[in-house]
Structures are given as C-alpha cells and as structure tokens.
C-alpha cells in the first residue's frame, strides 16, 4: 500500500455502522504490518471517535460523516470530518477523547468551515531483535 493512497468511508449518524469503520481500520492496519495489539488500539480508537461524533450529532445532524484513512510506511492516520459544529468546550474532558489520546500516538481536533475535524495517528512500532 503506497503512501499516496487514501481510503475514504462515509457513514451515516448511526451507531450500527461503527463496525464498518472498525473493520476497515483493522484491514488497513493489518495490510501495513501492524501487530495485533496495535491493530486493537486503532480499532478501539476508531470506535471511540465514531461514538463521540455520533453522540454529539445524533440530535442535530442527519448528514453523514467521513473517515479518511491515510496509510504510510510506518504509520496510519485517520481523519474524521463532520459538516456540523460540535461543542469544543467539552472535547478535552470527554472519556472517548481521553481513550483515543491514550491509544494513539497523535490526536488533533479542529474546526473547519462550519465543521469538525479530528485526526488520529498510530505509528508502527517495529520490533528488532538485533
């Protein structure tokens, strides 16, 4: 999988589709050679991010949200894009956000043109027996 490839997934604001995001993230991480524990971290972080977005938008938005998977040689980044405003006041205190920060190597949250963007990255830890 080359670093130029981006895999996009669009999901409705419905918790029933979180498994599709988990399966996609697992497949991409496996293809990149991530270990089982790293893949589980990624899947859990993706679930938490989707749950966070769905909970924040369930009453206010019917438009879908996007996940963009950006695989690289030694990491994978997942960008969540929502075309709706999410209250940023509570973002850093949310349990889901704290879990994502613990499981992933990098996390950024930002607003974008009346929307919300969350980017999470997991670095591949290469184990050497030299």
Image: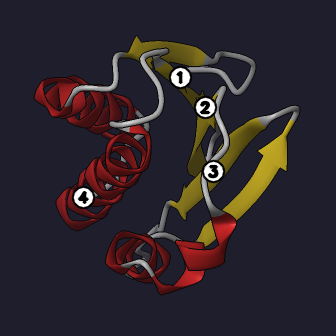
How would you rate the neighbour count of disc 1 (Cα within 10 Å): few for under 14, some for 14-19, many for 20 or more?
Answer: some
Circle 2 or circle 4, nearest the eye:
2
- Left/right of residue 127 with respect to residue 24 in the rendered view: right
Q: Is residue 66 above or below residue 40?
A: above
Residue at position x 38%, y 30% from top?
28
Mark 4, residue position: 44
Tell me the distance, in whole angstroms, between the alpha carbons under discs 1 and 4: 17 Å
Tell me the distance, in whole angstroms, between the alpha carbons under discs 3 and 4: 15 Å
Circle 3 or circle 4, nearest the eye:
3
Task: From the top left corner, tell me how far across and down residue 109 is, in percent.
Answer: 70, 60
How would you rate the neighbour count of disc 2 (Cα within 10 Å): few for under 14, some for 14-19, many for 20 or more?
Answer: many
Secondary element at tag 1: strand
Secondary element at tag 3: strand
**Badges 2 and 4: C-beta atoms under 8 Å apart?**
no
Looking at the figure, which quarter contains the N terminus?
top right
Mark 2, residue position: 82
Along the viewing direction, whichever of 1 and 55 lies nearer the viewer: 55
Mark 3, residue position: 118
| N-terminal-most mark, 2 or 3 | 2
| N-terminal-most mark, 1 or 3 | 1
Tell me the distance, in whole angstroms, between the alpha carbons under discs 1 and 3: 11 Å
**Badges 2 and 1: C-beta atoms under 8 Å apart?**
yes
**Badges 2 and 3: C-beta atoms under 8 Å apart?**
no
Residue at position x 63%, y 69% from top?
106
Circle 2 or circle 3, nearest the eye:
2
Task: From the top left corner, tell me how far across and down residue 121 is, in percent.
Answer: 58, 57
| N-terminal-most mark, 2 or 4 | 4
**Badges 1 and 3: C-beta atoms under 8 Å apart?**
no
How would you rate the neighbour count of disc 3 (Cα within 10 Å): few for under 14, some for 14-19, many for 20 or more?
Answer: some
| N-terminal-most mark, 1 or 4 | 4
Secondary element at tag 4: helix
């Amino acid at each position: 999988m080359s670093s130029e490839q981006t895999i996009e997934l669009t999901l409705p604001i419905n918790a029933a589709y979180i498994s599709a995001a988990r399966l996609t993230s697992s497949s991409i991480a496996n293809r990149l050679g991530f270990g089982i524990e790293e893949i589980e971290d990624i899947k859990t972080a993706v679930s938490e991010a989707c749950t966070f977005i769905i909970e924040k938008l369930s009453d206010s938005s019917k438009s879908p949200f996007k996940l963009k998977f950006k695989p690289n040689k030694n990491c994978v980044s997942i960008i969540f894009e929502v075309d709706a405003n999410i209250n940023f006041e509570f973002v850093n205190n949310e349990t889901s956000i704290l879990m994502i920060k613990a499981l992933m190597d990098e996390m950024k949250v930002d607003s974008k043109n009346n929307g919300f963007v969350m980017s999470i990255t997991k670095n591949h830890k290469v184990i050497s027996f030299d």
